[in-house]
Image (cartoon, grey):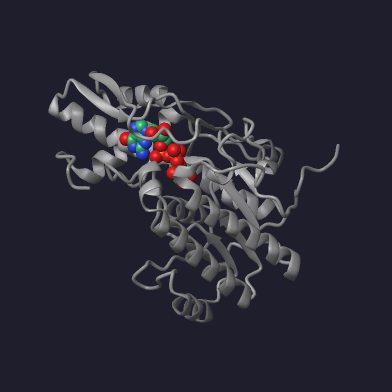
Amino acid sequence: MSEPYGAVRRPLDRSARVLVAGSRGLVGSAVWRHLAREGFTDLLGPGSSEVDLRERGEVFDWFAEARPDVVVLAAARVGGIKANATRPADFISDNLRIQTNVLDAALEHGVERLLFLGSSCIYPKLADQPIKENALLTGPLEPTNDAYAIAKIAGIVQVQSVRRQHGLPWICAMPTNLYGPGDNFHPEHSHVLPSLLRRFDAARREGAPRVVNWGSGAPRREFLHVDDLARACLHLLEHYDADGPVNVGTGTDLTIREAAEQVAEVVGYRGTLEWDPTQPDGTPRKLLDISRISALGWQPRITLRDGLIETYAWYVDRLGSDGLRL
Ligand code: GFB
């Protein structure tokens, strides 16, 4: 049998100095927890008060001092459909600057191993489903997040260019829609699952008879728990070395309406779910083909239901009993 595309066995030294860029965010904090659990002893994750990754000089000074061996580039300006649609200039500018600075500094300081994290929104709006990695740059993007997607595509091409020009084994992973403990629960700017957890929790506490969600409820989405992504990140760093990005997802999706029903059940909200068609639906479907990473030996482990229960518990714990502090 032929080897899977890009397959290698290249374990990372547990004493390697690893920069987790974006270590305070949803993805970075999960990657940090996973690496610590796996025995990594020299993790670095400067916060934005230490290094503003948008500032080139600060990033280069930090690299000169810290000299990491490995970089996981999980830092990004992220948000849900409305944040992307209303602040595209911030999304393209911040993300281009963050990733260009970190990738350039990593190159200048000879970082051997690097993983860049993109997003499933890099693929064309109407790509064939499930979406294979080779769908990249084959059609127009979803307009609600084209600025973010273009920045992420630029990051992929920069990593590929470094591979080609400098021969470094840097790689890219493309996660599907993520959720989990540590997510942003802002009512307007967050992604759909934290938004719904917060809205249904408030409605249950207030005894509201109905909640109104955005859009038609018909779009389909795939949701991956961020701890599953964190395992995938280390797995790819140790088992993958090729030019093409690698999708990371669950391989199954559901409608937003079905997702909302699951959230209502987890929260214990028994009122009516209504839909506001004046709000954007975004892309109709975004299901990743995960055969590339599956062939490398990674599978998701956390079901949506278990993940929602855990994320809701984290939210309630974080907020205390009044549910109003975020
Ligand atoms: O998670 P979400 O904001 O991002 O929205 P996208 C997913 C779907 O849920 C859309 C619907 O069809 C929304 O209209 N939805 C229903 C809601 N109620 C709500 C709500 O209260 N809040 C939110 N946020 N959505 C993002 C991209 O797209 O996905 C980013 O904008 C990124 O670039 C991210 O790629 C993973 O899946 O539509």
Q: Judge by depth and name the residue closer to the eye, 139 or 44.
A: 139
Q: Please state if 275 lies on the left or on the right of 1 as rendered.
A: left
Taking the spot 38% from the left edge, 35% from the top edge, the residue there is 280
Image quadrant where residue 199 sits:
top left
Q: Is residue 193 visible?
A: no
Q: Judge by depth and name the residue closer to the eye, 323 or 306.
A: 323
Q: Please state if 233 lies on the left or on the right of 9 as rendered.
A: left
Q: Please state if 119 lies on the left or on the right of 8 as rendered.
A: left
Q: Is residue 53 above or below residue 152?
A: below
Q: Is residue 262 above or below residue 20?
A: above
Q: Is residue 140 above or below residue 152?
A: above
Q: Position of residue 22 (x, y in %)?
A: 44, 60
Q: Position of residue 275 (x, y in %)?
A: 31, 24
Q: Is residue 180 above or below residue 117?
A: above
Q: Is residue 132 visible?
A: yes
Taking the spot 49% from the left edge, 34% from the top edge, the residue there is 302
The quadrant of the rendered image in which ligand 1 is seen is: top left
Q: Position of residue 152 (x, y in %)?
A: 55, 54
Q: Judge by depth and name the residue closer to the eye, 73 or 272.
A: 272
Taking the spot 53% from the left edge, 81% from the top edge, the residue there is 64
Q: Please state if 58 lies on the left or on the right of 199 as rendered.
A: right
